[in-house]
Amino acid sequence: EAGVVQSPRYKIIEKKQPVAFWCNPISGHNTLYWYRQNLGQGPELLIRYENEEAVDDSQLPKDRFSAERLKGVDSTLKIQPAELGDSAVYLCASSLRTSGTDTQYFGPGTRLTVL
Amino acid sequence: AQSVTQLDSQVPVFEEAPVELRCNYSSSVSVYLFWYVQYPNQGLQLLLKYLSGSTLVKGINGFEAEFNKSQTSFHLRKPSVHISDTAEYFCAVTGSGYSTLTFGKGTMLLVSP
Protein backbone atom coordinates (compact mmCIF):
# COMPACT_ATOMS: atom_id res chain seq x y z
CA GLU A 1 0.00 0.00 0.00
CA ALA A 2 1.42 3.36 -1.00
CA GLY A 3 1.90 5.86 1.79
CA VAL A 4 1.24 9.57 1.88
CA VAL A 5 3.06 11.28 -0.97
CA GLN A 6 4.33 14.83 -0.76
CA SER A 7 6.16 17.04 -3.20
CA PRO A 8 8.51 18.73 -3.44
CA ARG A 9 10.71 17.31 -0.71
CA TYR A 10 12.80 20.46 -0.48
CA LYS A 11 12.14 24.03 -1.49
CA ILE A 12 14.30 27.13 -1.19
CA ILE A 13 12.78 30.50 -1.98
CA GLU A 14 13.39 34.15 -1.26
CA LYS A 15 11.08 36.02 1.06
CA LYS A 16 7.98 37.52 -0.49
CA GLN A 17 7.87 34.78 -3.10
CA PRO A 18 4.92 32.36 -3.32
CA VAL A 19 5.29 28.63 -2.72
CA ALA A 20 2.99 25.63 -2.94
CA PHE A 21 3.13 22.14 -1.50
CA TRP A 22 1.23 19.11 -2.75
CA CYS A 23 -0.04 16.07 -0.88
CA ASN A 24 -1.64 12.84 -2.04
CA PRO A 25 -3.10 10.87 0.89
CA ILE A 26 -3.38 7.13 1.32
CA SER A 27 -6.09 5.76 -0.96
CA GLY A 28 -9.47 5.68 0.75
CA HIS A 29 -8.51 8.02 3.58
CA ASN A 30 -11.19 10.66 4.04
CA THR A 31 -9.34 12.95 6.45
CA LEU A 32 -6.29 14.98 5.53
CA TYR A 33 -4.11 17.13 7.77
CA TRP A 34 -1.44 19.73 7.17
CA TYR A 35 1.07 20.29 9.98
CA ARG A 36 4.00 22.63 10.36
CA GLN A 37 7.08 21.45 12.24
CA ASN A 38 9.53 24.10 13.35
CA LEU A 39 13.10 23.14 14.14
CA GLY A 40 13.32 21.31 17.44
CA GLN A 41 9.56 21.19 17.91
CA GLY A 42 6.73 18.76 17.41
CA PRO A 43 4.29 19.18 14.55
CA GLU A 44 1.48 21.69 14.94
CA LEU A 45 -1.79 21.44 13.06
CA LEU A 46 -2.50 24.02 10.38
CA ILE A 47 -5.67 22.63 8.85
CA ARG A 48 -7.79 19.48 8.81
CA TYR A 49 -10.06 18.34 6.00
CA GLU A 50 -12.83 15.80 6.16
CA ASN A 51 -13.45 14.95 2.53
CA GLU A 52 -13.57 18.33 0.75
CA GLU A 53 -14.51 20.36 3.82
CA ALA A 54 -12.01 22.23 5.96
CA VAL A 55 -13.35 21.42 9.43
CA ASP A 56 -10.53 22.91 11.49
CA ASP A 57 -8.47 25.81 10.13
CA SER A 58 -8.23 27.79 13.34
CA GLN A 59 -4.42 27.68 13.34
CA LEU A 60 -3.96 28.56 9.68
CA PRO A 61 -2.58 32.12 9.20
CA LYS A 62 -5.19 33.11 6.69
CA ASP A 63 -3.56 36.34 5.64
CA ARG A 64 -0.87 34.44 3.76
CA PHE A 65 -1.72 30.75 3.86
CA SER A 66 -4.39 28.99 1.84
CA ALA A 67 -5.27 25.38 1.23
CA GLU A 68 -7.59 23.38 -0.91
CA ARG A 69 -8.66 19.78 -1.28
CA LEU A 70 -10.51 19.47 -4.51
CA LYS A 71 -12.60 16.31 -4.96
CA GLY A 72 -11.66 15.20 -1.48
CA VAL A 73 -8.44 13.50 -2.54
CA ASP A 74 -5.17 15.37 -2.95
CA SER A 75 -4.48 18.74 -1.42
CA THR A 76 -2.38 21.85 -1.96
CA LEU A 77 -1.07 24.22 0.68
CA LYS A 78 0.06 27.65 -0.49
CA ILE A 79 1.96 30.49 1.13
CA GLN A 80 1.90 33.91 -0.49
CA PRO A 81 4.02 35.83 0.24
CA ALA A 82 6.49 33.74 2.23
CA GLU A 83 8.26 35.23 5.24
CA LEU A 84 11.52 34.24 6.91
CA GLY A 85 9.59 32.71 9.81
CA ASP A 86 7.83 30.28 7.48
CA SER A 87 10.98 28.19 7.22
CA ALA A 88 9.92 24.80 8.56
CA VAL A 89 8.96 21.29 7.53
CA TYR A 90 5.40 21.01 6.25
CA LEU A 91 3.91 17.60 6.91
CA CYS A 92 0.81 16.09 5.42
CA ALA A 93 -1.02 13.26 7.14
CA SER A 94 -4.11 11.25 6.33
CA SER A 95 -6.47 8.94 8.18
CA LEU A 96 -9.67 6.99 7.79
CA ARG A 97 -11.97 8.61 10.27
CA THR A 98 -14.96 6.48 11.20
CA SER A 99 -15.87 6.73 14.87
CA GLY A 100 -13.82 7.28 17.97
CA THR A 101 -10.31 8.36 17.11
CA ASP A 102 -8.28 7.73 14.00
CA THR A 103 -4.65 6.90 13.39
CA GLN A 104 -2.79 9.45 11.31
CA TYR A 105 -0.17 8.41 8.77
CA PHE A 106 2.40 10.99 7.79
CA GLY A 107 4.17 11.78 4.57
CA PRO A 108 7.91 12.57 4.36
CA GLY A 109 7.32 16.32 4.51
CA THR A 110 8.49 19.32 2.52
CA ARG A 111 11.39 21.24 4.00
CA LEU A 112 10.96 24.93 3.20
CA THR A 113 13.80 27.38 3.51
CA VAL A 114 12.99 31.07 3.09
CA LEU A 115 16.01 33.30 2.48
CA ALA B 1 -7.12 21.73 26.33
CA GLN B 2 -4.47 19.10 25.99
CA SER B 3 -0.73 19.19 26.41
CA VAL B 4 2.20 16.82 26.28
CA THR B 5 5.48 17.10 28.11
CA GLN B 6 8.47 15.08 27.05
CA LEU B 7 10.81 15.44 29.95
CA ASP B 8 14.08 14.81 28.14
CA SER B 9 15.19 16.60 25.00
CA GLN B 10 18.04 14.13 24.47
CA VAL B 11 18.72 10.64 25.78
CA PRO B 12 22.19 9.21 25.09
CA VAL B 13 22.55 5.47 25.53
CA PHE B 14 24.95 2.70 24.57
CA GLU B 15 23.98 -0.01 22.13
CA GLU B 16 22.21 -3.01 23.74
CA ALA B 17 21.32 -0.99 26.84
CA PRO B 18 17.68 -0.50 27.91
CA VAL B 19 16.04 2.86 27.40
CA GLU B 20 12.98 4.73 28.66
CA LEU B 21 11.65 7.89 27.02
CA ARG B 22 9.30 9.77 29.28
CA CYS B 23 5.99 11.35 28.34
CA ASN B 24 3.42 13.06 30.54
CA TYR B 25 0.15 14.48 29.34
CA SER B 26 -2.72 16.59 30.54
CA SER B 27 -6.25 16.40 29.23
CA SER B 28 -9.74 17.08 30.48
CA VAL B 29 -11.23 14.17 28.55
CA SER B 30 -10.48 10.51 27.96
CA VAL B 31 -7.25 10.23 26.05
CA TYR B 32 -5.76 8.32 23.22
CA LEU B 33 -1.97 8.27 23.16
CA PHE B 34 0.59 7.73 20.43
CA TRP B 35 4.33 7.45 19.97
CA TYR B 36 5.84 8.37 16.62
CA VAL B 37 9.45 8.09 15.44
CA GLN B 38 11.10 10.45 12.98
CA TYR B 39 14.33 9.49 11.26
CA PRO B 40 16.45 12.28 9.74
CA ASN B 41 14.79 13.99 6.79
CA GLN B 42 11.77 11.73 6.99
CA GLY B 43 8.17 12.01 8.12
CA LEU B 44 6.71 10.53 11.28
CA GLN B 45 6.20 6.79 11.55
CA LEU B 46 3.73 5.33 14.04
CA LEU B 47 5.45 3.19 16.69
CA LEU B 48 2.45 2.32 18.84
CA LYS B 49 -0.83 3.64 20.18
CA TYR B 50 -3.08 3.32 23.21
CA LEU B 51 -6.79 3.57 22.53
CA SER B 52 -8.30 1.38 25.26
CA GLY B 53 -7.88 -1.99 26.95
CA SER B 54 -4.56 -3.27 28.21
CA THR B 55 -2.36 -0.51 29.55
CA LEU B 56 0.77 -2.19 28.18
CA VAL B 57 1.02 -1.58 24.47
CA LYS B 58 3.51 -3.28 22.17
CA GLY B 59 4.66 -1.62 18.99
CA ILE B 60 7.05 -2.09 16.14
CA ASN B 61 10.83 -2.51 16.40
CA GLY B 62 10.62 -3.99 19.91
CA PHE B 63 9.21 -0.88 21.58
CA GLU B 64 6.47 -0.90 24.19
CA ALA B 65 4.72 1.72 26.29
CA GLU B 66 2.63 1.69 29.42
CA PHE B 67 -0.38 3.91 29.98
CA ASN B 68 -0.60 5.07 33.59
CA LYS B 69 -3.77 7.04 34.17
CA SER B 70 -3.04 7.99 37.78
CA GLN B 71 0.34 9.42 36.85
CA THR B 72 -0.87 10.73 33.47
CA SER B 73 2.11 9.13 31.80
CA PHE B 74 2.82 7.08 28.70
CA HIS B 75 6.51 6.20 28.84
CA LEU B 76 8.19 4.40 25.95
CA ARG B 77 10.63 1.56 26.63
CA LYS B 78 12.91 -0.81 24.81
CA PRO B 79 14.96 -3.49 26.60
CA SER B 80 17.91 -3.38 24.21
CA VAL B 81 18.53 -0.59 21.69
CA HIS B 82 20.33 -0.70 18.38
CA ILE B 83 22.32 1.94 16.55
CA SER B 84 19.46 2.10 14.06
CA ASP B 85 17.09 3.32 16.80
CA THR B 86 18.84 6.69 16.73
CA ALA B 87 16.02 9.10 15.86
CA GLU B 88 13.61 11.67 17.28
CA TYR B 89 10.66 10.28 19.20
CA PHE B 90 7.39 12.17 19.62
CA CYS B 91 4.60 11.51 22.08
CA ALA B 92 1.15 12.74 21.07
CA VAL B 93 -2.29 12.88 22.64
CA THR B 94 -5.81 13.33 21.43
CA GLY B 95 -9.09 13.04 23.27
CA SER B 96 -12.52 11.61 22.86
CA GLY B 97 -14.33 13.73 20.31
CA TYR B 98 -11.11 15.35 19.10
CA SER B 99 -9.18 14.75 15.92
CA THR B 100 -6.28 17.07 16.54
CA LEU B 101 -3.09 15.47 17.77
CA THR B 102 -1.11 17.50 20.26
CA PHE B 103 2.56 16.63 20.11
CA GLY B 104 5.36 16.97 22.60
CA LYS B 105 8.60 18.66 21.61
CA GLY B 106 10.32 15.37 20.98
CA THR B 107 13.16 13.37 22.52
CA MET B 108 16.29 12.68 20.53
CA LEU B 109 17.53 9.14 21.22
CA LEU B 110 21.26 8.89 20.54
CA VAL B 111 22.57 5.33 20.48
CA SER B 112 26.33 4.91 20.41
CA PRO B 113 28.46 1.76 20.07
Image (cartoon, rainbow, N blue to C red):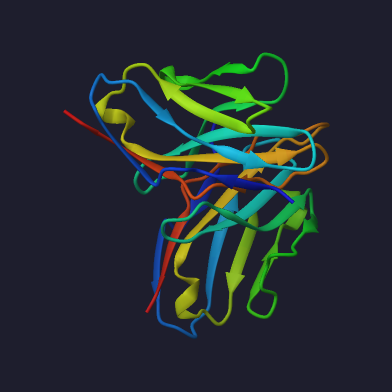
Task: Identify the image quadrant of residue A105.
Answer: top right
Image quadrant where one finds the C terminus of chain A: bottom left
Q: Nearer the viewer, residue B80 or B28?
A: B28
Percent x, y for residue B26?
68, 43
Asked if residue B55 is positioned above or below residue B3 in the image, the reply reads above
Q: Nearer the viewer, residue B17 or A9?
A: B17
- Asked if one can make out residue A16 in the rendered structure from this viewpoint, the answer is yes
Asked if residue A87 is positioned above or below residue B26 in the image, the reply reads below
Q: How many marks?
A: 0
Residue in the image at 81% along x and 31% along y: A100
Image quadrant where one finds the N terminus of chain A: top right
- Residue at the extreme bottom: A16
Residue in the image at 73% along x and 44% along y: A31
Task: Identify the image quadrant of residue B73.
Answer: top right
- Residue at the extreme left: B113
- Asked if one can make out residue A102 in the rendered structure from this viewpoint, the answer is no
Relative to residue A5, is residue B32 drawn left or right?
Answer: right
Asked if residue A83 is positioned above or below residue B11 in the image, the reply reads below
Relative to residue B28, is residue A112 drawn left or right?
Answer: left
Relative to residue A98, is residue B50 drawn left or right?
Answer: left
Percent x, y for residue B102?
63, 48
Percent x, y for residue A42?
51, 51
